[in-house]
Image: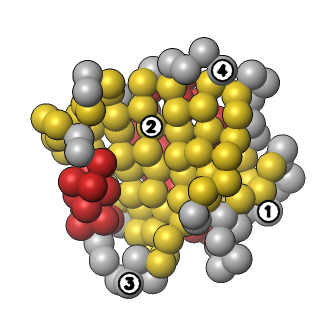
Amino acid sequence: MKALLASLLCATYLLLAGGTQAAVQEFGPDFSRFTIDVPEGWTAKAIDGGVQLADQGGTCSLAVTNVKSGGASAEALCKAVVQKSGMQDAKELGKEDGNYAMSGTRDGVPIVVAVTAEGELAVVIVMAGDIEKASGPLDSLQ
């Protein structure tokens, strides 16, 4: 799980750094666009601030959003997302400079929320279901 968290935090850092590599699709608000490869058999739906990906079999989903944080910490933002999502038995997965992650369940479905905050911007990643599979597209996040 620590390797997964490290991968998440690295991907969110790359987002904030403003990577420009080409990818299959581009998403996000005008102030902070990003690209991500959508795996074959997955659907991508633009949502406010980003994208929600889901595998065709319905075993997992991944949402990536860029938001204006108002200077809030990654921990505060992550806890707000967890509370809003109705996640039960939430626990801290990891915490380091500008990064915070929690895991738990909602209706028996595993969920991981990871946030990276830097200045006035934050990247929020929410994975549900098969967390390892859901994290796969993060490798292409730019």
Q: Residue at x 86, y 52 (%)?
A: 22
Q: CA distance from mark 4 to mark 1?
A: 28 Å
Q: Mark 4 against mark 3, which lies toward the viewer?
A: 4
Q: Quadrant of residue 111?
A: top left
Q: Reading the chain from its start, which is encountered first: label 3 or label 2? A: 3
Question: Which quadrant is the N terminus positioned in?
Answer: top left
Q: Nearer the viewer, residue 97 or 26?
A: 26
Q: Is residue 126 left or right of residue 84?
A: right
- As displayed, is residue 62 above or below residue 122? above
Say which residue appears at 55% left-offset and 20% top-offset.
58
Name the kind of residue labelled 1 in the image.
Thr
- Res 71 visible: yes
Left of 71 or right of it: where is 132?
right
Q: Amino acid at mark 2?
A: Met
Q: Position of residue 68 (x, y in %)?
A: 47, 78
Please, what secondary structure does the residue beneath circle 3 have?
Answer: loop
Asked whether residue 10 appears in the rendered view, the answer is no
Q: Quadrant of the C terminus?
A: bottom right
What is the quadrant of residue 74 in the picture? bottom left
The residue carrying mark 3 is 70
Q: Which mark is residue 56?
A: 4
- Residue tagged 1: 20
Q: Residue at x 62, y 25 (%)?
A: 55
In the image, which is nearer the foreground, mark 4 or mark 1?
4
Q: Report the Cα–Cα distance between label 3 and label 2.
A: 24 Å
Q: Is residue 77 above or below residue 21?
A: below
Among numbered discs 3 and 1, the one appearing first in the sequence: 1
- Gap between marks 2 and 1, in whole Å? 24 Å
Q: Secondary structure at mark 1?
A: loop
